[in-house]
Amino acid sequence: MSILNFTPAVGDTAFTSLQQELLSKAQQLGKDCFAPRAPHWDVTATFPLANYDDLRAAGILRMCVPAAHGGLGADYATYMMTGAEIGRYCGATALTLNMHICSTMWTGVLSDGIAMTADQQAEHHARRHLHFKRIVEKGALYAQPFSEGTAAAAGRAPFGTAARKSVQNGVSGWVINGRKIWASLSGAANYYGILCTEDIEGKNPDPRDTLYIAVPAESEGLTISGDWNPMGMRGTVSRNLTFKDVFVPDDEQLMPRGVYFKAAQTWPAMFFTLAPTYLGIANAAYDFTVKYLRGEVEGEPPVKRRQYPTKQIAVAQMRIQLENMRSIFLRAITEAKPNPSKDEKLRLYAAHYSVMEGANDIARLAIRTCGGQSMMKHLPLERLYRDSRCGSLMLPWTAELVMDRMGRETLYEPGEKDDS
């Protein structure tokens, strides 16, 4: 039974003790630290390093590291709830935290649900101990860049970034060449967990040969380039990474060869983890609108605007949409597992689309309802609107791709084709 003294961004449900602990930490940090700092990261387009110091001290960076490795052992649903609460106060912090947490969740609870050989399991358990130790003992920050401006990020083509087996100075490892764009945490991460295609002599590139490898930030041949001046999510600092003959030892592999491809086929909910940020933003836009109409925004004149029927109707519309988003989000995260049923997978797509598009709908209504003041930079709505609009663009599940998947997978069973 929940003993929280606030309603989390995911709404009310039966929370575990760990979920209550993490939600309380996220809410306190959000109110006291993240929300006051958010305008600065937005205006300057700089990474929220101070927020990460707070997340590190609160143990949130190791939340999904298994307890046996010194972490908090949070499961998928617990992270999704916590991420949404952080997104309520700073979208850029929540969105970038997702990249780090997924690096631990994919190698932890998610990998435990993927079929591996005994040798692969032994290899994976030994190597993930190294990565978890860095996070637990040194507070290391992992990024997860995979976009390349091609169909690879959507799972429809092999990655252009390639890794070739090599031995250098007696050390077995990989030589990596390629380029990643939209690389969130660029310049802030200690390790970049990149997806790349194994370069096998005499064989065409194949998504089945995808490798997931951590590249240390100080690696020779790794460079960061490009300007960063986007419309929204400005604090993510997602510049370009270029890899030129970058050598990394075998132990930097985050998954054994071929396991990432199995993960993508087995665990579709692994691509739903961008959604909590936008559920949080939707909550923030709704929260502000209610306070504004009640004349309770700190620093603003205590003028009440709640008496107008048009304002009341707009708030009702926002609340209805928010409750629908919360409900389908909660259903999706509690159902998340390996090899979901067809209905569960379609519901997951519906939840993703509903949150990503719904966040912007709520932010749009908030701006219209609060009126001209909402355009002012000293208030958060215009930033929330800009950030919310970015959600439907996020690979691998953009709004368009999700619609395409839903339609196709509803009408076709696996392996079915139309007669030519």
Image: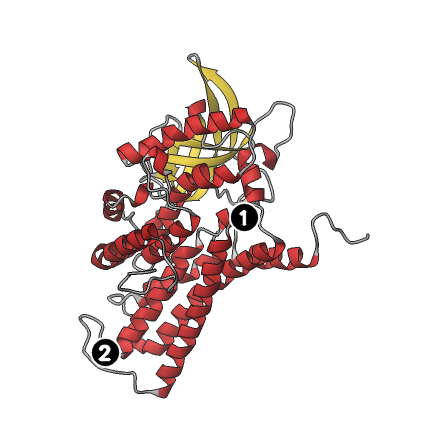
Q: Examine the rendered structure and indicate whether residue 395 appears above or below residue 179.
A: below
Looking at the image, is mark 2 or mark 1 earlier in the sequence? 1
Q: Which residue lies furthest to the top in this view?
A: 170
Residue 55: percent from the left, percent from the top?
Answer: 27, 46
Which disc number belongs to residue 268? 1
Helix, strand, or loop for circle 1?
helix
**Residue 226 visible, this orientation:** no
Say if residue 32 shows up in the picture.
Answer: yes
Kindly report which numbered mark, 2 or 1, lies closer to the viewer in this rendering. Answer: 1
Q: What residue type is labelled 1?
A: Pro
What amino acid is labelled 2 in the image? Gly
Q: Which of 234 and 299 is in front in this view?
A: 299
Task: Give the position of the N terminus as an image quadrant.
Answer: bottom left
Q: Which corner quadrant of the image does residue 71 belong to?
A: top left
Q: Distance between the residues labelled 2 and 1?
A: 44 Å
**Numbered badge on residue 295:** 2
Residue under the image location 33 percent in, 62 percent down: 8
Apparent side of residue 159 relative to residue 319 in the rendered image (left or right): right
